[in-house]
Amino acid sequence: MSLILISGCGSQNSSVSDFTLSATPTLIFVTDGGSSQPINIAAAAVGDFKSAINVTVSGLPSGVTASPSTISIMPGQSGQILLTASNAAVTPSVPITLTATSGELTRSTTAALAVRPGQTTATLSASSFNFGGSLVGSIQTKQVVTVTNTGSFNLWLSPTLTGDPGFVLVSTNSCGAILAPGASCTESVSYAPTAVSGTTPQTSSLNLGLSNVSADTPQTVTLSGLSAVLPAGTVTATNNPQVALYTMTLPFPGSVVVNFGPDTTYGRSTWSKSTAVAGAQISMLVAGMLPNTTYHMQATVQLSDGGSATDVDHTFVTGSAPIAPNLSVTTTPGMTPQSGVEELTFLGAMYTGLAVTDLQGNILWNYVLPSNDAGVNVQGAKLLPNGDFLLTVGESSVQSLIGPTNVTGNIISIREIDLAGNIIREISANDLSAKLQAAGYDLTLLEFHHDITPLPNGHWLVLSNVMKAFTDLPGYPGLTYVLGDVVIDVDENLQPTWVWNEFDHLDVNRHPMQFPDWTHTNAVVYSPSDGNIIVSMRHQNWVVKVDYSNGTGTGNILWRLGEGGDFMLQGGVDPTDWQYAQHDPSLFTPNSSGNFELGLMDNGDDRAFPTGVVCGTTGAPPCLYTTVPVFQIDEGAKTATLTFHQILPTSLYSFWGGNTELLTNGNIEYDLAGVGADSDIFEVTPTSTPQTVWHMHSTGSNAYRGYRIPSLYPGVQW
């Protein structure tokens, strides 16, 4: 270290009043973060000088401070200024100037100041860091090591990288040049490979450059990473003309989302599919496209180790939709419907199948039964958490009345399909009957019908029917075949684990309508709050809660909602404002026990009226009309209070089918499935005088159920 020493200077004239100035030591060492060091200043009189002298110091490097900043001494006296370094730059000696003034006299002297670091101790959190897999052209930035100053003085750092040029130091959010005692910091490095590594990792060495620690202190971190080029994906057609298969091979574990739309701005996205295996393929069914339209699609890849990339743009031309119902849609000006798409199950002579439309009524996706399924319908379709559809394939419940066995030969099954229409899992009524009989149940299933309910544990609640022969029932002399329903819990292996048979829990002699089609159950709703099930029995005019207890329940009926049931009706006229021949109840609150809300479609086929009221006469209500009720159920008080009750005009009387649901935006949507040969689906405000927000009309086709779903992909909102 070279030192520059400058002695004091100033004129001396014994004939005038003056003073001289000196400072010791002439070389001052201060330790960064250490204790203060003094510089002593003395003044001597020349002649008869006797005035006070003020002394200041200047030229101090950044981080070095003087205390006090100014001292006052008399000739013949000395004073002291303390110099302290805190977060100062380590530097060899630099000159500092001490300036003394008294009146018009100014004298100065210089000294040398050197800042040196105090030796400290430090630790590193790791000696190596693996970036894992990354794609050429992508970049991932990681905090690769944590440095901790475990000593008593500031730690000085000067990090450098040597090795593969794909590794670069990142100053943002990284350690600075100085780390205080007891503090920690992280060092960030980016890995942006420019070439393929192959199987041999690319490496670099990070040296933290710790300058004031012992020589044996670890201060290097070995960095490594693998790199590859992302192979271009492929897009191919599927059995569904509106669904493409997009396949990507990922060189490293990661996930894929496909963005698609009519141009390269895309606009819609699938959900994410992932793989934990390097070199594995991910295949994504891309659905939600208009028929006979050219689409652009591009996959976005996110690797598990942090890198990301996009595939090249692909084009795909959709084909014609095999189901093309006559749909018209109107949205009330100034109102905004709940976003998403509409899932529709069509029954009838003109169109039969499952379709999803946008909110303008355009077909985005459909599933039509194969030709070998002729004569049967799709019912009760539900979108599963795995992205498949679960549906019932059957004729209808009443078809079983032809006799004690199903003799039509049509395929009757519970079926899981993917978006291309491929069958993933399926079980027939005959096969499930055999399993039930092997498990000790004396049951022969006829039809799967109306509904299928997936459970949170992966099981399915299957709705089927059975026939039982009775002799000389009251009003029915001789032999009568009575059609009732069963609910079967099947596990992931399609094995029955729990059965509820309505013949075991209801009086066969109660039959308000259409006996011997006795119960005509059309919906099973899981009650998450207590693990029970809510069952809608159309021909009993009842909605009942059943002790299911997540597959361990007795099957006992806990309550019956409707005319002649267990609840007192509030906010409406008893018996008229109960539900009749209802369909598809749904929960309107997160809870489903104690006190909660339940909405349903009240078709109103056999509505009862107070004594003395003759429907259809002057001054009396019409006999046939449909309502949309929402009941506040109090299980303890056994009250059912109407919180919403839209009574529809007779022109919208829907004698069968339909459903009601609460939308995310708070509006209510309901499907009037059987308005003659047509259907009407409304989104309305939940007000005392409901306002129509959105309306879809189906001409010549009956939409058995209509649901607003977020998109064709679970967890994705369109």
Image (spheres, rainbow, N blue to C red):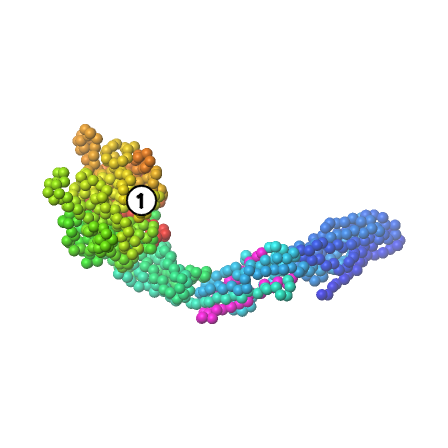
Q: Does 187 lie within the magenta span? A: yes
From the top left corner, tell me how far across and down residue 541 is, in percent: 22, 39
Q: Which residues are magenta?
A: 184-212
Residue 17 in the figure: left or right of residue 622 = right
From the top left corner, tell me how far across and down residue 427 is, in percent: 24, 56
Residue 494, image quadrant: bottom left
From the top left corner, tell me how far across and down residue 561 is, in percent: 27, 38
Residue 536 in the figure: left or right of residue 306 = left
Residue 323, image quadrant: bottom left
Q: Is residue 481 visible?
A: yes
| Residue at numbered disc 1 | 532
Could you tell me which quadrant the N terminus lies in?
Answer: bottom right
Q: Nearer the viewer, residue 183 or 656?
A: 183
Q: Nearer the viewer, residue 182 or 435?
A: 435
Please give the name of the residue rendered at 51% of the width and 63% of the height, measured from the top-left corner: 129
Please give the name of the residue rendered at 32% of the width and 43% of the height, measured from the top-left corner: 587
Please give the name of the residue rendered at 23% of the width and 52% of the height, measured from the top-left corner: 440
Q: Secondary structure at mark 1?
A: strand
Q: Is residue 674 visible?
A: no
Q: Amino acid at mark 1?
A: Asn
Q: Does 198 lie within the magenta span? A: yes
- Name of the residue lying farthest toward the front: 440
Residue 119, image quadrant: bottom right
From the top left corner, tell me how far across and down residue 403 is, in percent: 14, 49
